[in-house]
Amino acid sequence: MDDFLLRAGLGAGLLGAAAGPLGCFVLWRRMAYLGESIAHMGLLGAAIGLLIGISPLVGVSVLAVAAALVMARAGDDLIPAGTFVGIVGHVGLALGFVLLASMETVRTDLLGYLFGDVLALSNSDLIGIGAAALGILGGTALFWRAWLSAAVNGDIARAEGRASRVADIAFLVLVALLTAFGLRVVGALLIVALIIIPPAAARPFARTPEAMAIIAAVIGALTAPLGLSLAWWKDIPAGPAIVLAAAAMFALSMLAERVRR
């Protein structure tokens, strides 16, 4: 019991720490809906992976990255980009649910794909999440200035040469990878909450973008032990409990800000 709880806490904590700084840019660029649609497509990727006999994580990663790049280019005069992103994401969710429901061997695991199964993380899962977290944090540090310029004012950043297509693609790929690994922790329906709630909770305490990213990483990491404790205490699913712990920290941060004012 101690081993699987330790793996769950480490895996969710590492993912939350990586999600905090990256989630700041999702929040600043108002791209939460894009992240949600990528997460929905991730469920379809897991189903396709199981269908063709490869690791669901590989299927999720490939389809999530492909969906991020496609949806980032979406939108025209007839169909706004937000509408197209929403359509693609929910169609992917529906197709993934149908495929998983049609497979007798995984039908009982549907809730795990939708809401995560963090307590079932293996040592190899933990190594993968750790590598992904380090890669996401390293990529965030590498592209920090370019992403921050684009978040403040994309047109000015492009005019001054601070924004690049490579930085935009890197941002989408890292969001997709975070979503892919988050499928095991909190599921396709809740991963966006883990991405945007810690930065939102950090915002009242930060005076600079760097401070907000650091505080968001700390809050994201703390949601794991708090959520697992809540799951053990109330006997509820661990993935949703982690998100509820993040929501509680957000509520406390808003309350503290109101008291300070």
Image: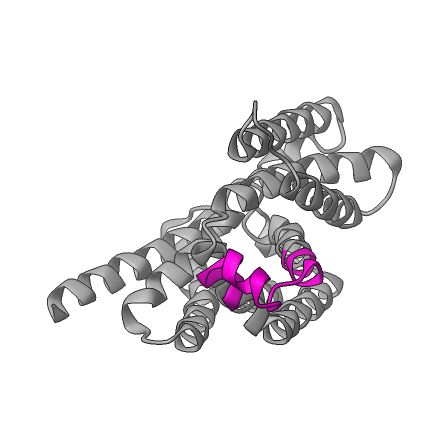
Report the number of discs.
Answer: 0
Q: Which quadrant of the rendered structure holds the C terminus? A: bottom left
Q: Would residue 165 appear left or right of 188 to someone viewing this image?
A: right
Residue 233, relative to residue 80: is it above or below? below
Q: Would residue 35 appear left or right of 27 to someone viewing this image?
A: right
Magenta highlight range: 148-171
Residue 161 is inside the magenta segment: yes
Residue 234 is inside the magenta segment: no
Residue in the picture at 45% in, 62% down:
152
Image coordinates of residue 102 in percent, x first then y, are 73, 22
Residue farthest to the right, as pictured: 53
Q: Does residue 5 appear anywhere in the picture?
A: no
**Which colour assignment does the render follow?**
one colour
Q: Does residue 11 appear anywhere in the picture?
A: yes
Q: Would residue 243 appear left or right of 143 to someone viewing this image?
A: left
Image coordinates of residue 41 in percent, x first then y, are 66, 37
Residue in the picture at 64% in, 53% down:
172
The quarter holding residue 73 reads top right
The quarter holding residue 56 reads top right
Q: Which quadrant of the rendered structure holds the N terminus? A: bottom right
Image coordinates of residue 48 in percent, x first then y, are 79, 35
Q: Would residue 203 appear left or right of 176 to someone viewing this image?
A: left
The dominant secondary structure in magenta is helix
In the image, 31 versus 146, the foreground residue is 146
Residue in the picture at 58% in, 69% down:
146
In the image, 89 versus 93, the foreground residue is 89
